[in-house]
Image (cartoon, grey):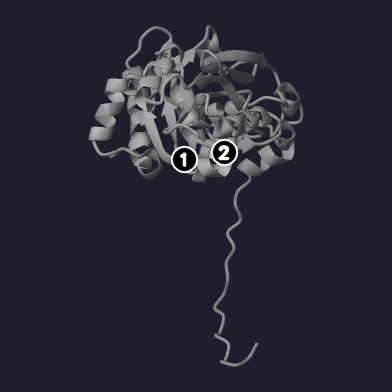
Amino acid sequence: MQSGITASPELHTAFQTLLSSPTQRGLLASISNETLVPITTIPSTSSNFTADLANLAPHLKPDAALYILLRRSPSTTSSPSSATATFVAITYIPDRAPVRQKTLFASTRLTLLRELGSENFGESLFVTEAEELSEAGWKRHEAHGNAERPLTEEERNLEGIKEAEAREAGGTGGRKRVGGGHLQINVGDGVEEAVRGLGEEGEGDNLVVLKIDIPTETLYLDSTTTATPSTLSSSISSTEPRYSFYRHPAPDSSSPILFIYTCPPSSKIKDRMIYAATKNAVTVLAEKDWGLPIARKLEASEPEEISAESIEAEFRPKEEVKSGFARPKRPGRR
């Protein structure tokens, strides 16, 4: 999976400095505002690579992912080209990091290598514990014959992410487990009541709009209102993704429920990823847990695409096109 994130000019500059500077052992990078950015450098205080790993310890947190670029051997020249394949790229994703952060960092690591020049890296690792980046941990890695190389073990990495999601699915509190227990959603106050209310016949609001608070991964109630097919789009955000449940006042008085997922192109990359990954879980939650029958599921980039005409087309009987027997054309004729 590609995340669409790119490296910042500052990261390119910092890496070029690392390539030519014998006083630097490594460079730490992260993701901020959908961009790969440098955090700090690691000094080279010893000619021994494994001894310098001790300088990493203060930066390895148990709940935050990190990219670590390390020089395997001291630089002996200021020419960046001589550094080819002497660096190791490490993707550090601890088990306690948020699930979405794990997914984002894992899906962006190939972008990091490609933008900084894959030829500069002779090795790439995926680690989940800080101890693996200690002197003792690295020696165990070398003794194992460098068997784990994430760039050639894509399925292994994805399996680790899925296992992390499954572990977190055992939580309690305001989280709702859906989709076979592999994904959970924090649900804010009033969301369930508003969605359930759409299934009740009456004169109340017929549009419920939900949003996700990205930092807390919580589903919140954005708005409830009464809308017609022609006014529906004006009640949905045109700058951020949204989930909308709409009770359509159909001509036959059936009042079917529509689930509408809108995701404007101007919305942030991380927002788009999280909304897309959670979309199916939200509909499962509404249908199975909250008893809301969904007649149609619509998707659009802009709310304006959801119009009276497009909704009407969803319920218009499909015309069956019949074709009679056509005699095969003779060879050589057009």
Instruction: Rate crowding at label 1 as few (under 14), some (14 to 19) or many (20 or more) other CA atoms within 10 Å.
Output: many
- Residue 312: percent from left, percent from top: 68, 40
Residue type beneath disc 1: Phe
Residue 242 found in image quarter: top right
Closer to the chain start, of discs 2 and 1, is 2
The secondary structure type at the circle numbered 1 is strand
46 relative to 221 in the view: left or right: left
Q: Image quadrant for the C terminus?
A: bottom right
Residue 48 found in image quarter: top left
69 relative to 318 in the view: left or right: left
- Check whether the beta carbons of the residues at disc 2 and disc 1 lie within 8 A of each other: yes
Residue nearest the viewer, comparing 265 with 181? 265
Identify the residue position indicated by label 1 in the image: 121
Residue at 53% in and 16% down: 219
Identify the residue position indicated by label 2 in the image: 116
Look at the picture and state if 108 lies above or below 47. below
Residue 35 found in image quarter: top right
